[in-house]
Image (cartoon, rainbow, N blue to C red):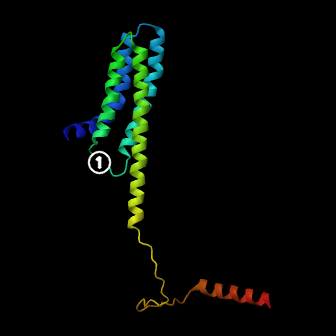
Amino acid sequence: MVLQRLMARLQPVLTVLLPLWLFFVGGFRAQSGWQVLALGIGAPVLFVALIVLALLIFLRPGRTPRLFDWVDVVVVLVVDVLVIVASMLGDLAWLSFLGLAVAAVGAIALSGWRLVQAGRQSVRHMHEQFQPRTEISAETIDGGEYTVIEVEESGPDANDRVDESDRSGDSRA
C-alpha cells in the first residue's frame, strides 16, 4: 500500500523528470549525432506518452483517489525503469529505445482498456440503479393554497399605456 501511494504521488513528477533524464543523461552517453537526434525527438514524445498514461490512470472511474492499484504500479514501474535503462546504455541504445517504445505503447493500451472497462462498469451500475417510472396516473395533484397578487399601475406611465392600448384597439376596427 505504501508503494501504491508513493507511485500515485510521484507519477506527476516523474512525468516531467524522466524525459529530461532521458535527454540529458542519454545525450552524454550518445556516441553519434543520430543518437542525439533520436533523443531530441524521443524525449518530447516520451513526455506526451507519459502524460497520456497518467491521464488514463488518474481519470479512471472507481479508482481510489490517492492510490494506484497493483496493475498501475507495475505498468508505471516498467516504463520508468526502461527509461532509466535506455538512457544509461550507449551501445545498445537503439534496442533499448525500441523496448521503451513497445512498453510505452503497451502501457497506454492497457491503461486505455482498463479505463474503458471501468467506464462500462460505471454505466452498467448506473443503469441497474435507474428505476424508470412505469405507472402513469391521471390523478390531480393538490398543490395546496395559491395566492394571487394583482398589481394596479398608477402614475404618469400608467395612463400612457392605457392610451396606447386604446389606440391600437381603434386601428383594428
| Position above or below: 22 against 130 | above
Decide which of 103, 162 is in the foreground and name it: 103
Q: Based on the displayed image, in which of its 4 quarters is residue 2 positioned?
A: top left
Decide which of 32, 166 is in the foreground and name it: 32
Residue 105 point in image, percent of width and height: 44, 31
Q: Is residue 35 visible?
A: yes
Decide which of 96, 38 is in the foreground and name it: 96
* Amino acid at dot 1: Pro
Residue 58 point in image, percent of width and height: 35, 44
* Location of mark 1 (residue): 65
Q: Furthest residue to the top? A: 31
Q: Based on the displayed image, in which of its 4 quarters is residue 172 positioned?
A: bottom right
Q: Residue at x 43, y 42 (%)?
A: 112
* Quarter of the figure that contains the C terminus: bottom right
Q: Residue at x 22, y 36 (%)?
A: 3
Q: Based on the displayed image, in which of its 4 quarters is residue 169 positioned?
A: bottom right
| Label 1: few (<14), some (14–19) or many (≥20) C-alpha neighbours in 10 Å | few
Residue 5 point in image, percent of width and height: 23, 40
Q: How many numbered callouts?
A: 1
| Position above or below: 9 against 143 | above
